[in-house]
Each structure stands twice: as structure tokens, then as C-alpha cells.
Amino acid sequence: MPGPHKWQQRFRTHVSRWTVPREVILDLLSRTSKHMSAKEIYASLYKMYPGIGLTTIYRTLDLLMRTGFINKFTIGDGQSRYEFKSGKKKEHHHHLTCIKCGKIIDYSDFMDEELEFVKKTEETLSKRHNFNVLGHNIEFYGLCEKCK
Amino acid sequence: MPGPHKWQQRFRTHVSRWTVPREVILDLLSRTSKHMSAKEIYASLYKMYPGIGLTTIYRTLDLLMRTGFINKFTIGDGQSRYEFKSGKKKEHHHHLTCIKCGKIIDYSDFMDEELEFVKKTEETLSKRHNFNVLGHNIEFYGLCEKCK
DNA sequence: TTATTAATGAAAATGGTTATCATTATCAAT
DNA sequence: ATTGATAATGATAACCATTTTCATTAATAA
Ligand SMILES: [Mn+2]
Ligand SMILES: [Mn+2]
Ligand SMILES: [Zn+2]
Ligand SMILES: [Zn+2]
């Protein structure tokens, strides 16, 4: 049973009620460096909170994504994955993924070069195709140490 | 009933039998500039070839992907999409996607800058994480002319 | 033409995600 | 602290893209 929590206030500016599942899921994602699926989150919480259903996991993840607390993405293994979105601008990163075992590595090398490249590309694409460009995905994939 | 076809020989180096579904699906993808899903391919072929089942579409797409004829990717709408892979090195491109209506635009601007950026990143990631980097995905997304 | 067996397609199964709906829990008002 | 309105939950079923099963068909070598 959670008391007032560091995210409660920020959360309440978006939606009305601060509940146990919402706190527990957000807390888990904020602490882990993993990129977890809904099922993994469910399994991880089950021992401590067996009452939290998978349905609520999905609903909460969708809510947290829509309110900007987390990112949703996929590595192509048929399930969505989620990660806590840090408030700090510095923590923009991309993923290096093993196509065999699914290992995901965060990296943030060459972000200056990337910024330049991305900016230029966004400008050109916006003008040429009359798009409102909202974001980008950059990822590298291959075989990790163990799998290659 | 297809006779000898321009892809038959190349195809036979990979797998044994040249069949109507295989020719027809490969032919469709080679002619269209769309990024079609399995269901869309099925629907597109149905009038001319009502005997070709959705199962065969999936199996053939997987085969064509494994043998390097096509690319498989997703724009996050819950279904896989496929595009013919041109033999020409020049035709490397990325996607600008509308997150509302799903419109996909191919672009290949700044491929020189990208190549430089990608090469540098690949080298660093390979060394630092002992990965065998096999490829990358770069995409921009936003709202298209009609949807913004 | 025939024999071999890879390929096909209808149907059922799978697996991630979403919709339904009766029940529960949050929280503003008392 | 209690109450009442209703947002949130969770068990279940439904949904939907994709895969598996298996009897039948068709491509190819002989
Ligand atoms: Mn990450
Ligand atoms: Mn394309
Ligand atoms: Zn691996
Ligand atoms: Zn659009």
C-alpha cells in the first residue's frame, strides 16, 4: 500500500487516480535497465502483487506511454517492449539488438553527429513531403558476443 | 501458368521448385512501389488467382525474405510489411511514415552523410560491445500533409 | 509417363493484445 | 472518518496476425 509517491503529483496532472498497479508498474520500469514486455512485467510483479492482472498491465503501459512516462518499441519478436523515459535531455539513446537472443544494448555514441544528421534530414523531409516530423528511430542490429 | 521467368534461375539456386504462387507474389512485389502486408497481397491477387491461400502468401514471403528477394519490416500497426529488394546498391533507402494514416514515403536523401555516420557508429559499437553488426534501421515518423 | 516428394491450402491452433462487464477502490465532499 | 460518484480493475472472452497440422496437389528428375 503506497503512500504519497514522487510521481504521484506529476501523474495527477494527467489522469485522476493514483493506484497501486500504476505506482508499482511505473516504479518497476524506473528502476530497471531492462526493456521489458507486458508479460515480463506481469511475471516480475506476480510474487509481490499477485492480484495485478495482465489486462491492467497493458492498460497501464498504454496510459504511461500516452502521458509521456515511458517509451514503447519493438525489436521484431512479436511483442511490444517498454522503457522508462528519463526527464533528462541528455539521456536520448538508441538500441543495438541481437537478432538471435534478443539482447538489447543502449548506446548514445555520436549523438552530436546524429543530431546534425537528423536535423538536416528532418528539415528536408518536412519541406519536400510537407510532413510534420515528430521523431525518429535509429537502431543497429546483429549478433552479440555469445551468439556470433 | 507461367513459363520460364526472369527470376526462375536465381530462385532455383536457393530452393527447388518454381511455382505459380512464388512467381506471382514475387512479380507483384517487384512491380509495386507500395509496402504491402500479407493480407493486402492476398486481396490483390485474389481476382486473378483465387486459389492462392493466405498461408501460402505467408510461407512464400518468408522464403523470399530468407533468400534475399524482399525486405520485411513494420511500421508499428501490428502487421508485417514487405518490399522488393532491388539488386542495385544505389537503391538503399529509408522510410518516412505517417503515424495516423500509415502512409509510407521512401527517401534516400543524405545517404553520403548517413554512410559516414553509420560506418563510424558500427565500428564503435562492434568494438565496444563485441557485436557482429549486420545492419541498421533508420526511420522518421510524423504526420503527413493530410493528417497534420 | 511415372515416381518422388516439395509445395499447397483448408482448418485449427497459437500468442499477443484488446473489449466487455460486473466488482472494487480512489478521492472529493461531507 | 464516512459516504457516494465513478474511475479503475481483473476475469473472461474476443480479436487478429501469424503459424502449425495434415491430407491433397503439382513440380521435377528419371
Ligand atoms: Mn533503451
Ligand atoms: Mn520502402
Ligand atoms: Zn545474442
Ligand atoms: Zn497521414
Image (spheres, coloured by chain):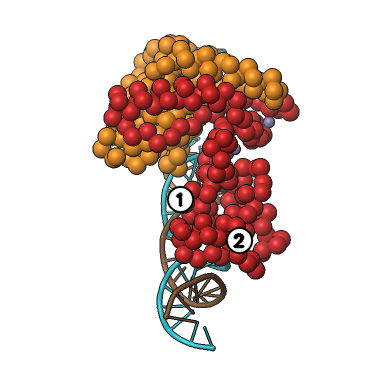
Chain colours: A orange, B red, C cyan, D brown
Judge if badges 2 and 1 mark residues of a common chain. yes
Amino acid type shown at disc 1? Arg
Callout 2: SS = loop
Identify which residue is drawn at 42% across, 25% down. Answer: B119
A55 sits to left or right of A29: right
Identify which residue is drawn at 59% across, 20% down. Answer: A121
Q: Residues within 10 Å of mark 2 (few under 14, many from 20)?
A: few
Identify which residue is drawn at 55% across, 60% down. Answer: B8
Which quarter of the frame holds ligand 2?
A: top right
Q: Which chain is indicated by disc 2?
A: B
Q: Which residue is mark 1?
A: B66
Q: Which residue is mark 2?
A: B5
User: Residue D23's spot in the image, x, y percent?
Assistant: 48, 77
User: Residue B76's spot in the image, x, y percent?
Assistant: 54, 36
Can you say whether B18 is above or below A108 in the image? Answer: below
Identify which residue is drawn at 65% across, 68% down. Answer: B1
Q: Earlier in the sequence, mark 2 or mark 1?
A: 2
Amino acid type shown at disc 2? His
Q: Is mark 1 within 8 Å of ligand 2?
A: no
User: Residue A2's spot in the image, x, y percent?
Assistant: 35, 19
A124 sits to left or right of B146: left
Closest to the observer: D17 or B1? B1
